[in-house]
Amino acid sequence: MLHILPRASTSTQVQRAVEAVAAAHLHHLGAESRERATQLHSQALKLLASELASPNLDETSRINGLACSLLLIYYEIVLGNSAENAWCHLTGAKVLLEYHMHQISHEPPCISFFRKVFQYFNVMLALSMERRPLLITGHRGPEFIDKMDTVFGCAGQLWPLMHRLADLFARVQLGEDVSHDAQSLIESLQAWSIESSPSSNTYLEATLQIANAYKFCGILMLQRAIPQIEIETERGDSQRQHSKIYRSAFDCVLRVCVLSTPMATLTWPLYVVGRLAKSASDRTLVLHIFSQFLEKHHMMVVDGAKNAVKNHWSEELTLQSHSWNSAPVLLG
């Protein structure tokens, strides 16, 4: 919040957006009405629209508009609300980022922070909606040179691979043959790694476990959606290798739960692992992790992901589900 809260004291639109997010969290806790959150959200939208309608926006106003747009995406995620609304805000944030990246030679820290926030929401919304991620004009995709992305507690260099994953799944929905690209992406995910730290810092360890959960879940998702691709294995037993990767993903998610650190970026890996859980034991643990997640972050989108997983289990029992589909929920 280092780059958000100071702006709330000088920008009414940012202040209203912060208040809307806070009211959304309080509504989930039962301490605030949904109407109050909606009212603050509406005020933030009107202030943002009025600001952007100005013919001559200065740099401060543009950065405030960017901050407000990203907060409004988070608002939709907290309430498990409208993915379409979130995508509209994402598109607006893209335009503002493009302007800064093409007009300013030196990127200030706040823009670097907001760019990382944008890239995370970009990938997660694209996976949720089965759309191709947005591309900032002049850039091929997310570029994180840092080994660790401190914004989301996930390894920075993993995000370009997640961007490719979201793009690939959107192309599948468009009817494209992506077998070759999927095989290449699986190999890239398998080759990607991040070293554990010798320190006993629980937050850092959770960061590493979340990053690895994304890696393994990406491989699992590709294998389920495109069965004809192969996973390299010494013995040629693809089913055994699939089970091994699932167990690695499950272990990473469980470790994050045990460490009891912030889990805000765990929704997607937990959703994927939950969908693939077969045993009663694994499913019980998945539901427990969802409950712990809710207690920490109070976001209705987590309820949406949990209910989607439970519905998938019910469909399996009635033999109605035979294929893999992306999440019918707004992931964040």
Image (cartoon, rainbow, N blue to C red):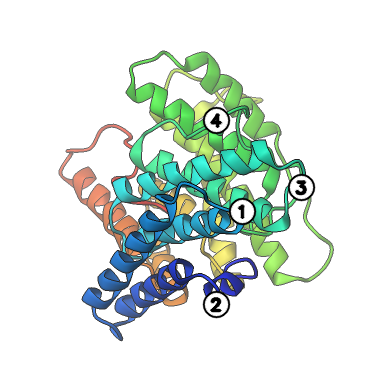
- The residue beneath circle 4 is 164
Contact flag, marks 3 and 2 (Cβ < 8 Å): no
Q: Quadrant of residue 184?
A: top right
Q: Position of residue 57 (x, y in %)?
A: 53, 51
* Amino acid of disc 2: Ser
- Discs 4/2, front: 2
- Discs 1/2, front: 1
Tag 4 or tag 3, which sits nearer the N-term? 3
Query: Which of the labelled discs sits on residue 9, or is there none?
Result: 2
Tag 1 or tag 3, which sits nearer the N-term? 1
Distance CA(mark 3)–CA(mark 2): 31 Å
**Figure quadrant of the N terminus:** bottom right
Tag 2 or tag 3, which sits nearer the N-term? 2
311 lies above or below 179? below
Tag 2 or tag 4, which sits nearer the N-term? 2
257 lies above or below 134? below
Residue drawn where x is 57% and y is 44% of the image: 97
Distance CA(mark 1)–CA(mark 2): 17 Å
* Amino acid of disc 3: Asp
- The residue beneath circle 1 is 59
Tag 2 or tag 1, which sits nearer the N-term? 2
Contact flag, marks 1 and 4 (Cβ < 8 Å): no
Residue drawn where x is 41% and y is 44% of the image: 125
Distance CA(mark 3)–CA(mark 4): 18 Å
The secondary element bearing badge 3 is classed as loop
* Amino acid of disc 4: Arg
The secondary element bearing badge 2 is classed as loop
- The residue beneath circle 3 is 146
Give the camera-side residue of 195 and 177. 177
